[in-house]
Image (cartoon, helix red, strand yellow):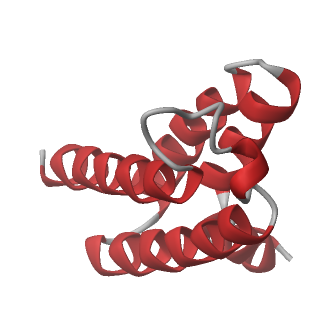
Amino acid sequence: MNKKFDYVILFTPTVFISLFIDAYFGCVFGYFLVILHLIYIVKKCDIKYLIISNIISCIISYILAIVILNDKWNYYFKPFLASDLVILISIISLIIQIVIKRK
């Protein structure tokens, strides 16, 4: 049971969820989910799984951003598109996780 929960957490598209909460509710609380997700993954995973889970989460978030946060929400994230922010936040998150994990 615990292992299934870990897989769900690892592959959760937290970047998309944070952008959706920001766009729909106008609340930055969603970005704290990215930080909590970052802390959880760093504590639970080796670097190999950390990178794999971030890539899969980024892909899922990117697809969801294109499908759900399409052109009608792009004005909100100016000068970026929602899909651009998914990639940017995912890369920054991955860099932070790797730096923390190596210490």
Count every numbered label the image shows and give the total. 0
Residue at 81 percent across and 62 percent down: it is: 68
* Residue 29 x/y as whole percent: 71, 22
Q: Quadrant of residue 75?
A: top right
Residue at 61 percent across and 27 percent down: it is: 32
Residue at 70 percent across and 55 percent down: it is: 71
Left or right, 15 with reference to 21: left
- The relative height of residue 29 versus residue 49 in the rendered view (above or below) is above
Left or right, 95 with reference to 79: left
* Residue 20 x/y as whole percent: 77, 43
- The relative height of residue 33 versus residue 64 in the rendered view (above or below) is above
Residue at 45 percent across and 68 percent down: it is: 54
- The relative height of residue 74 versus residue 58 in the rendered view (above or below) is above
The quadrant the C terminus occupies is: top left
* Residue 94 x/y as whole percent: 32, 56
Q: Quadrant of residue 62?
A: bottom right
Q: Pick whichever, 22 or 75, lies toward us.
A: 75
- The relative height of residue 77 versus residue 68 in the rendered view (above or below) is above
Left or right, 23 with reference to 57: right
Q: Pick whichever, 1 or 67, lies toward us.
A: 67
* Residue 53 x/y as whole percent: 49, 75
The quadrant the N terminus occupies is: bottom right
